[in-house]
C-alpha cells in the first residue's frame, strides 16, 4: 500500500504562485506514475499533470501548460506541483494520485479513480 498526503494549498491572489506537495509513504518503490488532479465546484475532476517516476517524463493538461510544473524527488517519496500565474479558474481541490503502471503516465485515459492510490486533497483558492 501507498499513502499519499497533500499539503501546500491555500488562498492567493490572481497572478500569484503556490507550491503543492504530495508526500508518499509505504511501498513507494512500486509506484511508476504520480499525478495531480483537480476538481472545481460543479465540474468534473480533471488531470492536471503527471510524471513518470523512472525517467521523469512529464505531461500537462493544456489549461496549465507553461504555468504549472510537476517534479519529484529521486526516492519517489514526494511529488510537487509548482503553480505560477494563477487565475480564479484554477480554484479547485487538488488531489495527488499514484499508480503502479507506467501506462497511467502515457495512456489517453486520465482518470483519478483509475489510479491505485489517491490522496484526500488540498484546497486552492485564487481570488481576482
Image (cartoon, rainbow, N blue to C red):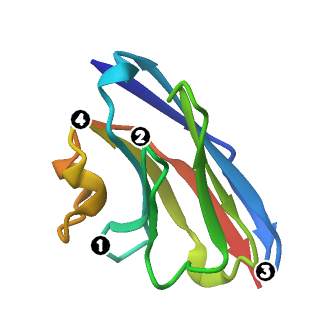
Q: Of the residues tagged 2 and 1, which is closer to the observer? A: 2
Task: Determine the CA span between mark 4 and mark 1.
Answer: 24 Å
Q: Of the residues tagged 2 and 3, which is closer to the observer? A: 2
Q: Which residue is mark 2?
A: 54
Where is residue 52 shown, x and y percent of the image? 40, 48
Q: What label sits on residue 100 in the rendered view?
A: 4
Q: What label sits on residue 44 in the rendered view?
A: 1
The answer to which of 9 and 49 lies nearer the viewer is 49
Q: Is residue 62 left or right of residue 17?
A: left
Instruction: Tell me which label, 4 or 2, sits earlier in the chain.
Output: 2
Q: Is residue 79 left or right of residue 15?
A: left
SS under mark 1: loop
Instruction: Tell me which label, 3 or 1, sits earlier in the chain.
Output: 3
Q: Is residue 7 left or right of residue 101?
A: right
Task: Determine the CA span between mark 2 and mark 1.
Answer: 29 Å
Question: Tags 4 and 1 in contact by the CB under 8 Å rule?
Answer: no
SS under mark 4: loop
Q: Which residue is mark 3?
A: 14
Residue name at image x 57 percent, y 33 percent: 78
Question: Tags 3 and 1 in contact by the CB under 8 Å rule?
Answer: no
Task: Determine the CA span between mark 3 and mark 1.
Answer: 22 Å
Instruction: Tell me which label, 4 or 1, sits earlier in the chain.
Output: 1
Residue name at image x 37 percent, y 21 percent: 29
Amino acid at each position: 500500500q501507498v499513502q499519499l498526503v497533500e499539503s501546500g494549498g491555500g488562498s492567493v491572489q490572481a497572478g500569484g504562485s503556490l507550491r503543492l506537495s504530495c508526500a508518499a509513504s509505504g511501498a513507494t518503490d512500486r509506484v511508476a506514475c504520480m499525478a495531480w488532479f483537480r476538481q472545481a465546484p460543479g465540474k468534473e475532476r480533471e488531470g492536471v499533470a503527471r510524471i513518470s517516476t523512472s525517467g521523469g517524463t512529464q505531461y500537462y493538461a493544456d489549461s496549465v501548460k507553461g504555468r504549472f510544473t510537476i517534479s519529484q524527488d529521486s526516492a519517489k517519496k514526494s511529488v510537487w506541483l509548482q503553480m505560477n500565474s494563477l487565475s480564479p479558474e484554477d480554484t479547485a481541490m487538488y488531489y495527488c494520485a499514484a499508480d503502479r503502471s507506467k501506462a497511467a503516465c502515457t495512456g489517453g485515459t486520465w482518470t483519478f479513480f483509475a489510479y491505485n492510490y489517491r490522496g484526500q486533497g488540498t484546497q486552492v483558492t485564487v481570488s481576482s
